[in-house]
């Protein structure tokens, strides 16, 4: 069970890191998508919003860098946790349990990123669910955040031995 938890943690780390790398490789598309969402364009359900449209490229770049940094940091924290888990794989149960800390911190940051930034800021504030581009991103963010949450719960709740 310890090896399964280590491999599951490794998969969480890789998921976070591969997503941010994909975004960096496709930086123009990422910027265009975020610009579109933050501009409040093409809203047909709730045409009025409490969120002001953000059209300044500098603000969009700032938001995008924030998202990318959180995604990368989540992956790196989980990866650090994988190293701790691997090092403690044959240790006493209390030592292995303590080694999970960075996995939980990274998964928590990932959940805050994909739920908080995407669902609270993007979904609720910018109403990104109203467009196909925003809705697709919101849907993807839901399952990424859910995978992190369920994986962390599995790692925490299933006995190690």
Image (tube, grey):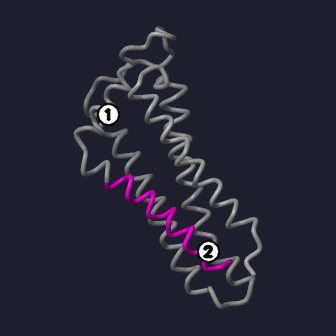
The residue positioned 38% from the left and 26% from the top of the image is 37
* 137 magenta-colored: no
Q: Is residue 65 left or right of residue 4?
A: left
Percent of width and height locating residue 151:
63, 60
Q: Which mark, residue 60?
A: 1
Q: Residue at x 48, y 64 (%)?
A: 13
Instruction: Residue lying at the far left in this picture: please name it.
Output: 28
Which x, y percent locates residue 36?
33, 25
Toward which corner of the image does residue 14 lie, by quadrant? bottom left
Q: Position of residue 128 (x, y in %)?
A: 46, 25
Image position of 145 with respect to 127: above or below:
below
Q: Quadrant of residue 153?
A: bottom right
Q: Which mark is on residue 4?
A: 2
Question: Which secondary structure lies at badge 1?
Answer: helix
Q: Measured from the top left, where is residue 10 in percent x and y? A: 50, 70
Quadrant (top left/top right/bottom left/bottom right) for the C terminus: bottom right
Residue at 37%, 49% (x, y): give it.
68
């Amino acid at each position: 069970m310890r090896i399964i938890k280590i491999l599951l943690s490794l998969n969480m780390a890789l998921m976070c890191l591969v997503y941010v790398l994909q975004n960096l490789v496709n930086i123009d598309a990422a910027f265009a998508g975020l610009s579109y969402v933050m501009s409040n364009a093409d809203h047909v359900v709730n045409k009025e919003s409490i969120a002001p449209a953000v059209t300044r490229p500098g603000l969009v770049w700032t938001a995008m860098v924030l998202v990318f940094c959180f995604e990368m940091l989540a992956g790196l924290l989980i990866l650090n946790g994988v190293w701790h888990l691997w090092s403690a794989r044959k240790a006493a149960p209390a030592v292995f349990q303590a080694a999970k800390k960075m996995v939980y911190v990274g998964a928590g940051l990932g959940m805050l990123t994909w739920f908080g930034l995407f669902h609270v800021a993007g979904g609720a504030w910018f109403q990104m669910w109203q467009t196909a581009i925003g809705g697709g991103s919101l849907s993807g963010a839901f399952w990424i955040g859910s995978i992190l949450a369920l994986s962390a719960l599995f790692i925490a709740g299933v006995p190690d031995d």
